Amino acid sequence: MIPQKTIEELINKHSTLEKDLSSGKIDKKLFAEKSKEYSDLNEIIEDAKKYILFEKDKAELEKILADQKSDKELLEMAEIELKDLQIVFEKNEKKLKLFLLPKDDADKKNAIIEIRAGTGGLEASLFASDLFKMYEKVSHKKKWSLELISISKSEAGGLKEVIASIKGTNIYSTLKYESGVHRVQRVPDTETQGRVHTSAATVAVLPEAEEVDLKINESDLRIDVFRAGGPGGQSVNTTDSAVRITHIPSGISVSQQDEKSQHKNKAKGMKILRARRYELERSRIDQERSEDRKSKIGTGDRSERIRTYNFPQGRVTDHRINLTLHKLEEFLEGEAFDEIIESLSLKAQEESLSKL
């Protein structure tokens, strides 16, 4: 059970916020923050009040059931009410536990997604392209904004690497489960014997860090400029517009040459560098936690095989939750994407609840 003191603190907090907001004396900067906190508490306040009353209501019903003088009809009603009360209590308890779970500050952030072709040669680059198109379709359906940061194409028309920024509501909380190795099984167009080939691509989803999230000292950076080069060594432009930024303490290096402007390339490069540094710091904090507290869902380990896309069988399987959907085409079109994401999110919540 959740300690009564914890629930009482929620109720008292809600009452205090209600008084503060109606007083009209709150600083404008704090008003939005307190309004959001009040709105969040509003969603569970009635459940909290019922939770507090549970023991009292339960005791009254048990008293009726224990009273030998109670008539049969009253006993039957009390028994039904007690069962209903227990069901409501369990439902409220789960909702309150979810509310009390530690919040990941990064969940509400925008995200940077990096997709790289892995094992499988040209076929892997085609699969990387398919994955990127899928995320583009998901973004369009959810009315998210997707901005291309850098792209490197393969000879077959696929993608060796693509990095993009996705902006919207709760982006990272939705996409964080995508980090890992995505495997594809299909017959390539170049295969004359009809044999199924296995290829892979890696996906990394990073919360987009703002300057307030992470301070990077200019003195810790080494910035090199050079002339951008295109496929086959051809010159993209005649000025030194390409930028390589190295964060000396961590060794993280980012190169950016997609823009003709050195300033724009540096800005894009810093966005990627900041996100990677922020994720590195988050990973360090996670590793300091005890092993039993780490979630098996959404660890973000890029070497972890998380999903298989099997074209001959028309299925997509997420290995972390052993969920298979025979909706491969719909999934790649972004139609069935939420089915797996919601299942992953629910599993992660269940893991967290079991540790409370």
Image: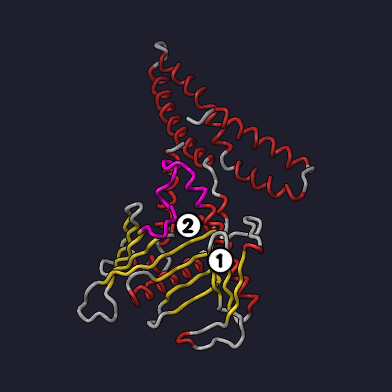
88, 78: nearer the viewer: 88
The residue nearer to you, when weighing 289 against 126, is 289
Q: Earlier in the sequence, mark 2 or mark 1?
A: 2
Q: Tell me which residue sits at (58%, 64%) in the image.
A: 247
Q: Residues within 10 Å of mark 1 (few under 14, many from 20)?
A: many
Find disc 2 in the rendering and name its residue: 176
Q: Secondary structure at mark 1?
A: helix
Is residue 115 toward the left or the right of residue 167 in the image? left
Magenta span of residues: 283-304
Please tell me whether residue 299 belongs to the stretch shown in magenta: yes
The image quarter in which residue 189 lies: bottom left
Task: Specify whether residue 289 is painted magenta.
Answer: yes
Q: Nearer the viewer, residue 246 or 201?
A: 246
Residue identifier under label 1 = 272
Q: Is residue 169 visible?
A: no
Q: What amino acid is found at the position of numbered circle 1 in the picture? A: Ile
Give the percent coordinates (x, y) of residue 87: 43, 33
Q: Position of residue 320 (x, y in %)?
A: 35, 53
Q: Is residue 344 visible?
A: yes
Q: Does 353 appear above or below 59?
A: below
Circle 2 crowding by C-alpha within 10 Å: few under 14, some 14–19, many from 20: many
